[in-house]
Image: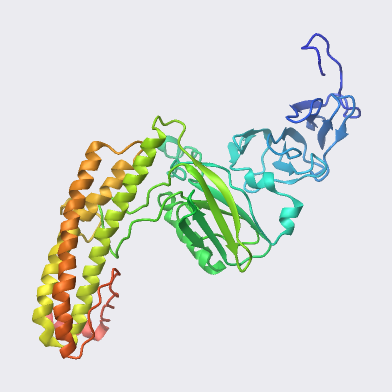
Amino acid sequence: QVTRDAGKTWKNVTPPGIGDFTRISIIEASHYAEGTAYVAANRFQLDDFQPLLYKTTDFGATWTKIVNGIAADEFTRVIREDPVRRGLLYAGTERGAWVSFDDGSNWQKLQRNLPPAPVHDLVVKEGDLVAATHGRAVLVLVDLSALRQMSAEVLAHPVHLFTPRDAYRIEWGGGFGGGGRGGVPGATNPGQNPTTGAVIYYHLTSANQKVKLEFLAPNGDLIKSYESADSAALAAERAAAAAAGPAAGGGRFGGGGATRPANAAGLNQFAWDMRYPDASSFRGMIMWAGGTRGPVAPAGTYSVRMTVGDAAPQVAKFKLMNDPRSTATEADLVAQFDFLMKVRDRTSAANDAVKTIRNVRAQLAERVAAAPRLKRTADAINEALAAAERELYQVKNQSGQDPLNFPVRLNNQMAGLAGVAGSGPYRPTDQSVAVYEEVSASIEVQLQKVQKVLTDDLNKFNQEAKRFGQPPVVPKAEDPPVTPRPTVTADADMMETDHAA
């Protein structure tokens, strides 16, 4: 029935031939044209399981049946029109979901990981498609941006980068783990949070191509770049990320866990975590309540540049938006980003100094092994560097629990500020700024001590080493090579046991 006078009069506009006692399940009025509407109906209670979808463009005077492509025994419950792309339709049937790119002339499955279940209703909400099923929960197809841009022309190109939708600067957490709702054993698992970050979609006609994604700041500067691996390496990385569970990213490739773009044939997804590069680290580093993650990029318009093989790069822009629930001003959040970048860089300076110290000491050991008469000079340098290292890092840490027994040192104190100042959207507090200045000054004292040893004392050592035919020690902010542990044979092990006895 249709009324055009606010309900004073009604007219029967039931599609002819739809059959008596047919249930009209959904009527969807068009967003784009007056008089256009879509109807989903069904007759399953009459043992008739055919899909029934209709379209009118003249207020119901005439109707067109639009079910081409839908299984003949998959009766329909709902049809919805996309509010952004005209002609893009979604339908829910007794066994799943369908999509049409041509206003219902043709349909194809939109099932993906949706279980075979009755889809009683669909709604498009802020760029997501939400499906209400009968008995199989509410499911969300997150981010319709690629579907809205999909076309035969796009699919005909060897490579295509879709324009990403804008992303909020929010850590969604990647999903919930555990064995039940609210921690109740045996209860149904709760839902999963969306992927954190800016989600990038791209289409490849052939697999195993080299894919490079570069993320650019509003001024065009490069923030981070990622390159794909071959299929075997990518599969191994995905398996490792999935095995690590939600705490390590839960298999959300790009946003946590794996950090390589996929390169499968068809549609691929990559989630940029919106973060600037991490602070440097070193092998075996253990911290307490501190880390090396880079800060989240401030709000603004960013770009992703995709290069596949030798093809010309493709560029797309997107926005990072502040959490609308926050009361922080733009100036507050810019101040927070600037502060976190200072913390990151100072953490890197401390950690690079530790790497340099360890690298130099490893080289000194090599020179002394080749020329024992260098030992006295090397010992003096070792002692001075070791003293600085002990101030910069808690060298007694061997496990994650050791910081409970041994006090944290300067690099950990600085890194801890990142967690405090970055725990929410707000300007860094006066206390955080004061701690930064104090710890930064202490780090600078140790850096200067290290630099003095590396210039004055090490130069003297290298001159002495030259007289013994040894190459100079060259400081590098790199982890020293791993010294392989000696292999103990069964016989040697038994001899050691006999000797102890």
Residue 82: x %, y % from top left: 70, 36
In the picture provided, is 40 more to the left or to the right than 61?
Answer: left
Q: Please give the name of the residue rendered at 38% of the width and 41% of the height, measured from the top-left corner.
A: 334
Tally the numbered discs.
Answer: 0
Query: Depth check: 197 or 486 in front?
Result: 197
* Whole-percent x, y for residue 308 in the image: 60, 64
Type of colouring: rainbow
Q: Is residue 68 visible?
A: yes
Q: Residue 116: which quarter of the image?
A: top right
Horizontal side of 14 relative to 169 (left or right) equals: right
Observer-nearest of 22 and 371: 371
Rendered view: 229 above or below 332: below
Left or right: 257, with 500 as reference point: right
Image-based side of 424 in relation to 83, left or right = left
Residue 148 position in % (x across, y down): 68, 44
Instruction: Give percent across and percent down for residue 411.
Output: 23, 55
Quadrant of the frame with the C terminus: bottom left
Q: Quadrant where the N terminus lies?
A: top right
Quarter residue 161 falls in: bottom right
What residue do we see at 49% from left, 51% from top? 272
Closest to the observer, 343 or 39 = 343
Residue at left offset 79%, top offset 39%: 103
Q: Relative to 94, is 309 above or below?
A: below
Residue extending farthest to the top is 8
